[in-house]
Image (cartoon, helix red, strand yellow):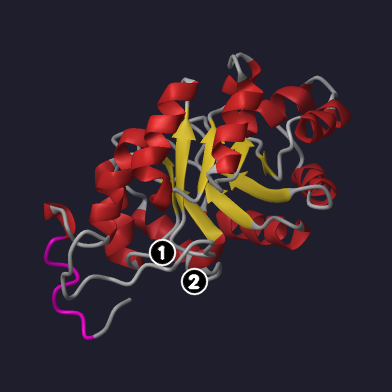
Amino acid sequence: MNYTLSNIPERDAKPRERGYTMAMDKGLSLREVEDFLEVAGDYVDIVKLGWATSYVTPNLKEKLEIYRAAGIPTYFGGTLFEAFIVRNQFEDYRRVLDQFGMTYAEVSDGSLDMAHDEKCEYIAKLSKQVTVLSEVGSKDAEKIIPPYMWIKLMKAELEAGAWKVIGEAREGGNVGLFRSTGEVRSGLVEEILTQIPFEKILWEAPQKAQQVWFIKLLGANVNLGNIAPSEVIPLETIRLGLRGDTFSHFLDMEKPC
């Protein structure tokens, strides 16, 4: 940091298991990636190439190498996985992961109907090849999953081999964990946390108000995802109580958290 302030929450050091910031790359150019990492690379833990953007992204290998050289792992969005599955091309998907040197993969079923046992089988198979993040929740705003089912699905996917489970919100933050207005389904989140350790969950929270809510609930070291590259630095200040939204939240703490 550039200077010293007291009563600043202690952030876990990278590589970390909690306090993750997952940034979403929706089509940055090579130069934009370099600029992004120059400013915010210290605060990014992993980058998702959103949905299936990797299919049409030019200079994909070069882009991935820039992230790799900066020590930041990447993965393709879960929609790409689903695009391969719906076409019965799972083995092709595995070869793509190898072709591009991917060490992480996302397994999701937000855009297609898939038996949960089948999804867990994909998680188990892929976990022998890469580190798996599995996404729970639907991209369909009309499909409401009750809390007990979120818990059941998350538990099963972690047991199948997922490293972390992702709470679905899409890039807009208006489905899954959130109402169409962006408001957090607070009862849902709190019930999930009675059964699933918070460090095992990556909450998609693209909107500032959502990030603030989770940080106030779970502290500076909550895992947050779908963060726009331009919002990584602002998010870090929210984590540290250096933006108006959390300015007073950490001032009275007895010890760093």
Position of 134 compared to 148: left or right?
right
- The answer to whether the residues at label 2 and label 1 have Cβ atoms under 8 Å apart is yes
Residue 182 spot, x, y in % from top left? 31, 38
Q: Quadrant of the C terminus?
A: bottom left
- Judge whether residue 77 can be spotted in this image: no
Q: Residue at x 69, y 49 (%)?
A: 132
Depth check, front residue: 81 or 5: 5
Q: Quadrant of residue 160?
A: bottom right
Residue type (three-letter) at the residue carrying disc 2: Thr
> Main SS type for the magenta part?
loop
Q: Position of residue 103 (x, y in %)?
A: 71, 45
Residue 152 position (above or below residue 26): below
223 shown above or below 30:
below
Neighbor class of circle 2 (other Cα within 10 Å; few <14, some 14-19, many 20+) is few
Marks 2 and 1, Cα distance to the nearest angstrom?
Answer: 7 Å
At label 1, which amino acid type do we have? Glu
Tell which residue pokes out farthest to the bottom in this image.
254
In the rendered image of this protein, does residue 47 appear above or below residue 56?
below
* Residue drawn at point x = 66 percent, y = 25 percent: 61
Write down the region rendered in magenta.
247-254
Q: Position of residue 59 (x, y in %)?
A: 61, 18
Residue behind mark 2:
194
Residue highlighted by disc 1: 190
Q: Quadrant of the N terminus?
A: bottom left
